[in-house]
Amino acid sequence: SNAYRLAVIPGDGIGKEVVPEGLRVLEAVSTKFGCVLNVDHFEFASCDYFQKHGQMMPDDWKTRIGGHDAIFFGAVGWPETVPDHVSLWGSLIQFRREFDQYVNLRPVRLMPGVPTPLANRKPGDIDFFVVRENTEGEYSSIGGRMFTNTEREVVIQETVMTRVGVDRVLRYAFELARRRGKHLTSATKSNGISITMPYWDERVEEISQGYPDVKWDKYHIDILTAHFVQHPDWFDVVVASNLFGDILSDLGPACTGTIGIAPAGNINPERKFPSLFEPVHGSAPDIAGQGIANPVGQIWSAALMLDHLGETAAAAGVVQAIEEVLSRPEYRTRDLGGSAGTADCGKAIADAILG
Ligand code: NAD
Ligand code: IPM
Ligand code: MN
């Protein structure tokens, strides 16, 4: 069927400004492409909710949104009122882990006409995906503090890699590379991180045997960040652990002009649970409430969501509308050197879809 139930969660800060633009574009999509989007709005997973209820989400959050076809999410975090680790571990990180969204798919693409900080780069030179492991690795709750507030104080946080967890994200990345440019790059640090990272490399080696048609290489994360800036044209699919993928997926979009356009799909490929679509950026407290945030990361995330739902024509239509609008300086927000507001840009994209 072409009817879908969406759980919409704006969260905090500019999440509340860019999500409405995403919905505006989705409305245009339903008019133009004839899919039916039934939207349920939720106020939890925000620091406002925390201030009222003492927790980020109701106890039954899983049943409230677990039956939806997808979750359309803004951003969480308002460190002035709730410490970041409390707000994020109480919401977004729970979604990723409890809904087994083990792939965080983050496209990086230089759009036509968009100014890039890299000299002499044109669209096509920067066009790759970061595939970030999203449920384990460096983001673990295993560890603790000892001898708190003494000179002997010790803090430990373990990195966890499981065979199942590593293999499944690697397979997803190899499959994606097979459908694209047949090239995969693995981010590692097996020279310094001497137990988990050599294991990661071993699994890449092993899984690669199933993909003889995909060429692959690996770089330590330190030089890989340099290559992102100096040779972004080298990359097709970049697979990385949770923390390395987090870092690469802000750096990549910065090379394409701004993190404000970058989208993410937190995906449960087996579709046992809903997947979650959100911009890569956060709640941007420094610009929140001014109507100047770039809505493109949220809108491009809507395109990833449509793609995931099987609405491939609609997804392509959204991306094309984004490209059309970004090529025109008058619709660019401040992070791209323009002076358009959030809604100006969002409306222009919705209008471009309606033709
Ligand atoms: P951030 O992404 O919110 O902001 C970083 C910088 O980029 C800021 O200067 C901001 O103004 C700018 N920026 C971000 N998005 C933009 C947009 N759409 N248009 C224009 N400019 C934009 O990262 P941060 O400052 O490290 O974190 C702020 C809060 O957001 C923290 O609470 C953090 O934990 C949270 N956070 C949440 C998510 C998420 O929900 N997925 C992601 C990252 C950070
Ligand atoms: C992201 C964010 C989150 C992460 C934070 C807010 C916990 O930076 O989605 O990239 O590190 O995964
Ligand atoms: Mn991040």
Image (cartoon, helix red, strand yellow):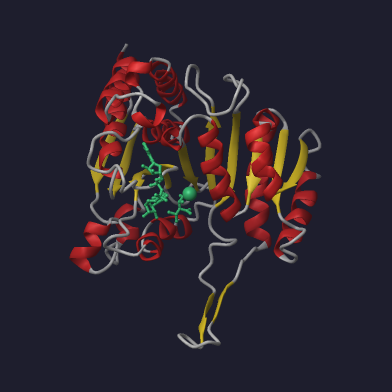
Quadrant hosting residue 86:
bottom left
Query: For this rendering, which residue is in front, 43 or 287?
Result: 287
Q: Quadrant of residue 354?
A: top left
Quick check: can you spot residue 84?
yes
Q: Whole-percent x and y of residue 79? A: 32, 59
Q: Where is residue 237 drawn, in percent x and y? A: 65, 37
Quadrant where the C terminus is found in the figure: top left
Q: Is residue 240 above or below residue 333?
A: below
> In the picture provided, is 12 more to the left or to the right than 321?
left
Residue 270 position in % (x across, y down):
53, 47
Horizontally, residue 306 falls left or right of residue 341, namely right
Residue at 72% of width from left, 33% of height from top? 183
Residue shown at 41% from the left, 20% from the top:
326
Relative vertical location of residue 46 with respect to residue 278 in this rendering, above or below: below
The answer to whether residue 278 is above or below residue 349 is below
Residue 191 position in % (x across, y down): 77, 58
Taking the spot 37% from the left edge, 61% from the top edge, the residue there is 84
Residue at the far left in the pictured view? 52
